[in-house]
């Protein structure tokens, strides 16, 4: 079975208002702002608090189960594309009984027969009325990090022109991340026009582009979760870790090989010149030489040199130990009574 995150709600670019004729279907309205709907009132209320609008009970067309929705005031939102391929596209025809046809433009997926629309109307079949042919349907799953709970919100568009715009942007993202990481995106509704057969057609397009400080960040490979949640970290200077005290580490060594290893560690970290011409390399080399000669690296004194002078120093003081002139200690007094010589411990 295909693994997927729970769907928390839908993001829409339109809504409907009641028809003046109660016998006719509601009138569809193209929205300039995003519309959020869900079975959970709490999710819709959170969206309303973040992006404006009033929460209302709402029942989708051809359904009986009531939901909640908010027509927000947001023309742009920030979201996160989950790992994998978050986009699915197909040509679909829906009726009161559900989806009756789903096609990739060549093969109808339910019957495995050739595309019905192409066979019936030719290559320009997509210009015909939605009542006659399948409609291009694009679905994209995004995560809204500022709303509650872990899951995705589904954005659905049935615009023929929007399908190319959405797919083109996401293909660039997937090429960069290979689908192995999340990607922060910016989404907005863009109103466009097209002229077909002398008629001007207006339609909304949902633009989805990476939301990163620089283009190179979007093309440099998979991102960390921290970068997906806060893209600004990609443009902040890295905090350099404190440099080790290599000289102190070398002075603590007891062998020349151990001291040389300290230099190699500094070299791998890029803290010394490879040719050893920098001051730190020279200091480490001197420490290694001192260890080889048996010189105490902390004091600079030869550990094997017992230099005791018999003469006085500049102040006339002799470097000797002085013992107090005290009477000899009674041997019997320094032992326990039972162990003192002559105490008769053995009978």
Image: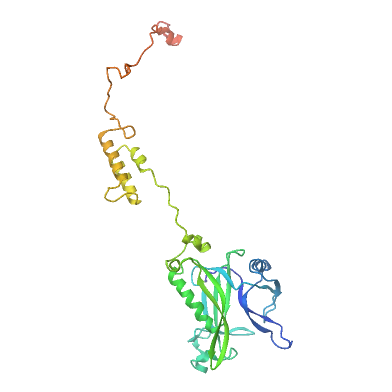
Foreground of the two, 228 or 58 = 228
Q: Residue at x 43, y 72 (%)?
A: 175
Residue 93: x and y in percent read 58, 85
49 lies above or below 108: above
Expressed as whole percent of the image width and height from the top left, the position of residue 223 reads 46, 64
Residue at 57%, 88% (x, y): give it: 201
- As displayed, is residue 192 above or below residue 328? below
Q: In the picture shown, does residue 277 fall above or below 230?
A: above
Q: Position of residue 192 (x, y in %)?
A: 55, 82
Q: Is residue 314 left or right of residue 188?
A: left
Give the quadrant of the C terminus: top left
- The one of 111 and 164 positioned closer to us in this rendering: 164
Spot the residue most to the front.
Answer: 314
Residue 24 horizontal/vertical position (percent):
71, 88
Give the left or right position of residue 76, taking residue 68 as reference: left
Q: How is the rendered protein coloured? A: rainbow
């Amino acid at each position: 079975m295909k693994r997927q995150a729970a769907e928390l709600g839908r993001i829409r670019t339109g809504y409907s208002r009641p028809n003046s004729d109660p016998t006719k279907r509601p009138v569809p309205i193209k929205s300039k702002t995003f519309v959020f709907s869900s079975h959970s009132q709490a999710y819709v209320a959170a969206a309303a608090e973040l992006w404006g609008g009033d929460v209302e009970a709402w029942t989708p067309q051809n359904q009986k189960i009531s939901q909640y929705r908010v027509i927000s005031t947001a023309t742009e939102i920030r979201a996160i594309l989950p790992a994998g391929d978050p986009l699915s596209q197909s040509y679909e025809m829906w009726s009161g009984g559900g989806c009756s046809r789903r096609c990739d433009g060549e093969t109808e997926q339910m019957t495995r027969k050739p595309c019905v629309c192409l066979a019936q109307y030719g290559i320009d079949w997509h210009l015909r009325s939605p009542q006659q042919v399948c409609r291009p349907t694009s679905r994209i799953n995004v995560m809204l990090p500022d709303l509650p709970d872990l899951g995705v919100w589904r954005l659905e568009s049935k615009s023929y022109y929007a399908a190319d715009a959405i797919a083109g942007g996401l293909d660039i993202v997937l090429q960069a991340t290979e689908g192995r990481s999340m990607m922060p995106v910016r989404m907005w509704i863009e109103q466009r026009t097209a002229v077909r057969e002398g008629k001007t057609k207006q339609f909304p397009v949902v633009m989805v582009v990476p939301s990163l400080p620089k283009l190179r960040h979007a093309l440099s490979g998979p991102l960390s979760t921290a970068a997906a949640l806060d893209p600004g970290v990609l443009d902040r200077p890295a905090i350099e870790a404190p440099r080790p005290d290599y000289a102190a580490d070398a002075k603590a060594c007891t062998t020349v090989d151990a001291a040389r290893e300290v230099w190699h560690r500094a070299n791998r970290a890029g803290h010394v010149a490879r040719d050893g011409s920098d001051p730190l390399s020279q200091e480490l080399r001197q420490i290694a030489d001192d260890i080889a000669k048996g010189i105490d690296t902390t004091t600079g004194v030869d550990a094997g040199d017992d230099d005791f002078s018999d003469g006085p120093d500049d102040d006339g003081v002799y470097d000797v130990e002085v013992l107090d002139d005290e009477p000899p200690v009674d041997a019997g007094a320094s032992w326990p009574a039972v162990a003192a010589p002559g105490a008769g411990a053995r009978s």
